[in-house]
C-alpha cells in the first residue's frame, strides 16, 4: 500500500527532488519547509513516515522530532533524519531523540528508497505490500485480495484498508480516533461512528468463513483483531 510520507526540508530543490522520488516509488508526499509548517500538517493528517532535515530555519529538526515523540498521537510515526553533517555526535543525538534512522546528504534515490522500505517494514507494516495471515485469514495488499483457504472474500476499499491495518497490528486495542487517524488519515472531519459502520461491514464480509470472530469489540476502548477469544 502506498505510504504517506512527510518531507520536512527547507531547500526547495532538495524538497522537490525527494517528493519526485517518493511519487516515483508509489508513495504520497506531503511537504513542509519548516518545523512549524510540518506540525500544522501533522495536526490534520498523520503521515506513515517523516523525512526530516536536521538544519531548518526557526525550530530545528531535532526539536520537531522531540515534539513528535512527546505527543501520544504522533509518537509512533517513524522518522528518518536527513543530515548534511557526517559527525557522529549529531547522529547519536538524533537517534537518542527517537529518530529511527538517518541518511547523510547527498544520497541517491535508491539509497533513500531502501531506507524508507526498511523503516516502514519495521515500524509501519501497514504501509508495505507484505502478505499477512492471522487465524487462517490472509490479506495480500499487492493483489488486493482477502482469502481464507480457497475462499475469496469480497471487501469494499475502506473495509480492506481497515482489515489490513488491524491485521498488521493484531492483538492491540485501537480507539476509534486512532483508527480514523491511521485508516482514514483524518481524525478531525470524520465522525467516530463512521468507524463502527465500517467495522459492521467488515464483520459481515468476513462472515462466510467465520472470520468475523477475529474482529473484537473491547468495551470502552475500541477494537482489536485477535485469533484468541
Ligand atoms: Ca536545511
Image (cartoon, grey):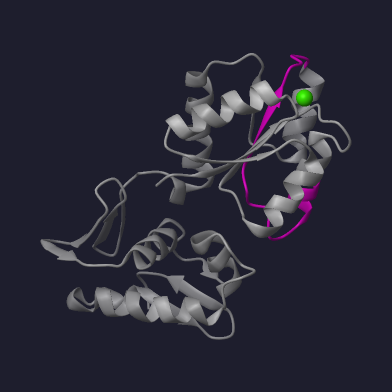
Tell me the quarter of the picture where residue 188 sits: bottom right
Q: Quadrant holding ligand 1?
A: top right
How many numbered discs sit on the rendered protein? 0
Residue 62 magenta-drawn? no
30 is higher (above) or lower (below) than 185? above
Q: Tell me which residue sits at (50%, 32%) in the image.
A: 22
Report the quarter where the C terminus lies: bottom left
Residue in the foreground of this view, choosing between 157 and 215? 157
Residue 71 magenta-drawn? yes
Tell me the quarter of the picture where residue 85 sits: top right
Q: Tell me which residue sits at (39%, 66%) in the image.
A: 158
Tell me the quarter of the picture where residue 95 sits: top right
Left or right for 106, reference 122: right
192 is higher (above) or lower (below) than 78? below
Residue in the foreground of this view, choosing between 42 and 84? 42
Left or right for 98, reference 163: right
> Which range of residues does the magenta coloring cover?
66-87
Q: Position of residue 223 (x, y in %)?
A: 49, 75
Amino acid at each position: 500500500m502506498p505510504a504517506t510520507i512527510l518531507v520536512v526540508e527547507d531547500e526547495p530543490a532538495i524538497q522537490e527532488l525527494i517528493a519526485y522520488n517518493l511519487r516515483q516509488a508509489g508513495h504520497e508526499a506531503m511537504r513542509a519547509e519548516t518545523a512549524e509548517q510540518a506540525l500544522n500538517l501533522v495536526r490534520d493528517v498523520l503521515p506513515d513516515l517523516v523525512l526530516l532535515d536536521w538544519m531548518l530555519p526557526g525550530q530545528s529538526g531535532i526539536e520537531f522530532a522531540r515534539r513528535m515523540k512527546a505527543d501520544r498521537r504522533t509518537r509512533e510515526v517513524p522518522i528518518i533524519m536527513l543530515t548534511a553533517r557526517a559527525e557522529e555526535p549529531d547522529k547519536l543525538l538524533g537517534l537518542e531523540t527517537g529518530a529511527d534512522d538517518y541518511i547523510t546528504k547527498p544520497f541517491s534515490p535508491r539509497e533513500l528508497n531502501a531506507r524508507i522500505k526498511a523503516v516502514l517494514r519495521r515500524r509501519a507494516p501497514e504501509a508495505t505490500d507484505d502478505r499477512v495471515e492471522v487465524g487462517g485469514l490472509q490479506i495480500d495488499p499487492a493483489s488486493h485480495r482477502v482469502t481464507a483457504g480457497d475462499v475469496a472474500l469480497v471487501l469494499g476499499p475502506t473495509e480492506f484498508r481497515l482489515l489490513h491495518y488491524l491485521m498488521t497490528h493484531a492483538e492491540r486495542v485501537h480507539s476509534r480516533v486512532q483508527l480514523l487517524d491511521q485508516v482514514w488519515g483524518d481524525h478531525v472531519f470524520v465522525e467516530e461512528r463512521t468507524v463502527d459502520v465500517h467495522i459492521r461491514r467488515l464483520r459481515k464480509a468476513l462472515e462466510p468463513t467465520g472470520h468475523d470472530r477475529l474482529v473484537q469489540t473491547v468495551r470502552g476502548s475500541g477494537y482489536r483483531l485477535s485469533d484468541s477469544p
